[in-house]
């Protein structure tokens, strides 16, 4: 019973294209944006000044009469206010938290992507190992007081759980993927 439930679950696990770990590689459309932005904001405040100063001096570059490029300091009030006041605020409170959030987000998504690749195989190995452990632990289970009841309960729980998971995966498939597909023409 346990082997049949496990095999059905393993079959469904490998025939379902997306096993439930959907990796969104766009940080700005993910659900992690605002929690990681807040964490990045805290990190930006804690590590204040580690990225350097988010400002600059505006310069005008032009060619002189000899064709040489000359850079002259721009003392325009509006540009100086942007580069000395607004850009450091934008850098410290918007750009740095986004950078810290991305530094956390993308390695986490790599782990999720690897987990999504490995998880079906790991679950298949675990599910195949459970019946083998039942047969190999015969000496240990003979010493248990209610061994037959324990074996029946564990077998029923695992089989019902795996059957429910397999059926929910089967019902979640698109009609063209499922084994219960009936063409409607």
Image: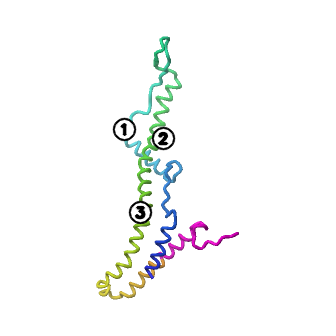
Nearer the N terminus, badge 1 or badge 2?
1
Residue at position x 52%, y 48% from top?
28
Q: Nearer the viewer, residue 151 or 51?
A: 151
Q: Nearer the viewer, residue 107 or 97?
A: 107
Q: Position of residue 127 (x, y in %)?
A: 41, 74
- Quarter of the rendering occupied by the N terminus: bottom left
Q: Secondary structure at mark 2?
A: helix
Find residue 118 and report its image quarter: bottom left
Q: Position of residue 73 (x, y in %)?
A: 46, 20
The Cα–Cα distance between marks 2 and 3, rounded to whole angstroms, is 36 Å
Q: Nearer the viewer, residue 53 or 18?
A: 18
Q: Is residue 95 magenta?
A: no
Instruction: Name the residue carrying label 2.
Output: 94
| Mark 3 residue crowding within 10 angstroms, few (<14) / some (14–19) / many (20+) | few
Q: Is residue 149 left or right of residue 137?
A: right
Q: Nearer the viewer, residue 148 or 97?
A: 148
Q: Is residue 96 left or right of residue 184?
A: left
Q: Which residues are magenta?
A: 161-185
| Mark 2 residue crowding within 10 angstroms, few (<14) / some (14–19) / many (20+) | some
Residue 50 is tagged as 1
Q: How many marks?
A: 3
- Quarter of the rendering occupied by the C terminus: bottom right
Nearer the N terminus, badge 2 or badge 3?
2
Q: Position of residue 130 (x, y in %)?
A: 38, 76
Q: Is residue 166 magenta?
A: yes
| Mark 1 residue crowding within 10 angstroms, few (<14) / some (14–19) / many (20+) | few
The Cα–Cα distance between marks 1 and 2, rounded to whole angstroms, is 15 Å
Instruction: Name the residue carrying label 3.
Output: 118
């Amino acid at each position: 019973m346990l082997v049949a439930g496990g095999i059905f679950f393993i079959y469904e696990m490998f025939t379902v294209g997306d096993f439930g770990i959907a990796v969104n590689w766009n940080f700005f459309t993910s659900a992690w944006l605002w929690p990681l932005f807040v964490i990045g904001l805290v990190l930006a405040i804690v590590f204040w000044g580690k990225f350097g100063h988010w400002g600059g001096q505006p310069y005008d570059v032009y060619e002189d009469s000899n064709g040489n490029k000359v850079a002259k300091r721009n003392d325009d009030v509006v540009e100086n206010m942007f580069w000395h006041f607004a850009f450091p605020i934008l850098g410290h409170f918007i750009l740095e938290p986004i950078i810290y959030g991305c530094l956390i987000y993308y390695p986490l998504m790599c782990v999720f992507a690897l987990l999504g690749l490995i998880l079906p195989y790991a679950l298949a190995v675990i599910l195949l190992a459970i019946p083998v452990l039942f047969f190999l632990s015969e000496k240990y289970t003979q010493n248990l007081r209610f061994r037959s009841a324990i074996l029946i309960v564990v077998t029923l729980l695992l089989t019902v759980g795996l059957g429910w998971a397999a059926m929910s995966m089967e019902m979640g498939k698109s009609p063209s993927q499922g084994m219960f597909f009936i063409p409607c023409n």
